[in-house]
Amino acid sequence: MGVAPSELLQDAVERVVLAGHEGKSGAGLERVRLADGRALVVKRFTPATDLTLALTGGEVGRELSLWTDGVLDRLPEGVGHCVVDAWLEDETGTTFTVIVMRDLGDTVLNWDHRVSATTAAWMAGRVARLHHGFLGDPPDGLVPVARVLDLFAPHRIAAHADAGIELLALALHGWEIFADVVPDDVAAPVLDLLADITPLADALSAGPVTLCHGDLATVNMAIEGDDLVLIDWAIPTAAPGALDVARFLVGCSQTLDVSREDFIDAWAGAAGDAHDERSLDLALLGGLVWLGWNKALDVAEHPDPAMRAREQQDLDWWVDRARRTLESGAL
């Protein structure tokens, strides 16, 4: 893929660097206003500046490939994206991925946004459309599911933590706590999977594989009319759609005015053949592999006792689901 500058930003009349945004990858963001009044957000990054790209491998952001290969334009009705252009730039021998997006403003959800029962069911249905639309036909060039599953594995993040990446230093500390706050019959298998994720990756790959967003969260969603717009396609992967559901619930269930079970049921009812129970069980185990460190930290060290109690209840649910999967022989 050649380096191709774009003329899109030549008409910019205002450019403002965005600081303190919700993303944690490290990519630089800039808000740009064009002479015709359009508002855009520009993301510019390399593996050296973007943590997600560094951890998943590759030199070029996957969102660029999804755009140039036309995958984003194949999203089903009711599921949108915000990319308007993407290209590569060369600067003193370094290749930058540039993603230009519509500025979605306050239609983008955040970590504090409360999701009503009605909206949660609608979200689940829209996500199911994505999974059903690409069922059995995920595009090429996605992040291997193994790299998505063990993104926070100690052996993957240790060097970055030692280099001063605060998020990953916290993750390492959380995994140290994990074995103290989770019963050994679950903690030990989870830590084993963090050392070698192959069994879980292979088991999930045997299910109804489709295109997964890979990092489904409220902060990567916007609601525009009847469309659920999915943002930040940094780690798209080929896996059962249940992986997205597990990702969403392990990170965002506290924002929902419905139970985890109700959200799962709403998705499963709309997903049709894109859902099977074994893949769901495996994906929920994967949720604990993904963010068990964060839950352990909150249970043990959150300064608010009420939050520690809430997180303990949440962790108990995930441990129970993981135990059921481990005992079922699904893995």
Image (spheres, grey):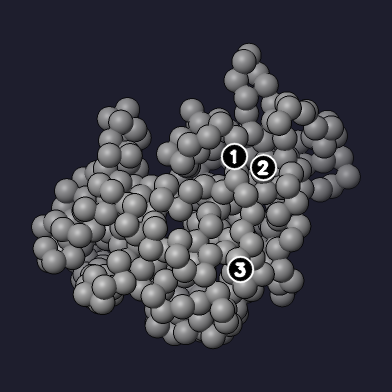
Q: Which residue is mark 1?
A: 61
Counting from the top left corner in percent of width and height, residue 195 is at 25, 47
Counting from the top left corner in percent of width and height, residue 27 is at 54, 37
Number of labels in the image equals 3
The mark nearer the N terminus, 1 or 3, is: 1
Task: Give the Cα distance between marks 2 and 1.
Answer: 6 Å
Q: Residue at x 61, y 59 (%)?
A: 138
Which dot marks residue 330? none
Query: 273 left or right of 79?
Result: left
Instruction: Give whichever of 212, 196 is nearer the camera.
Output: 196
Query: 244 left or right of 290?
Result: right
Q: Residues within 10 Å of mark 3 (few under 14, many from 20)?
A: many
Please name the amino acid that badge 1 sits on.
Gly
Q: Residue at x 55, y 74 (%)?
A: 274
Disc 1 is placed on an element classified as loop
Please name the amino acid that badge 3 sits on.
Leu
Which dot marks residue 64? 2
Quadrant of the frame with the C terminus: bottom left
Q: Residues within 10 Å of mark 2 (few under 14, many from 20)?
A: many
Q: Residue at x 42, y 63 (%)?
A: 204
Q: Quadrant of residue 128?
A: bottom right
Residue 291 in view of the camera: no
The mark nearer the N terminus, 3 or 2, is: 2
Instruction: Give whichever of 64, 199 is nearer the camera.
Output: 199
Disc 3 is placed on an element classified as loop
Which dot marks residue 135? 3
Please name the amino acid that badge 2 sits on.
Leu
Contact (CB < 8 A) between labels 2 and 1? yes
Q: Residues within 10 Å of mark 1 (few under 14, many from 20)?
A: many
Residue 77 in view of the camera: yes
Task: Give the Cα distance between marks 1 and 3.
Answer: 23 Å
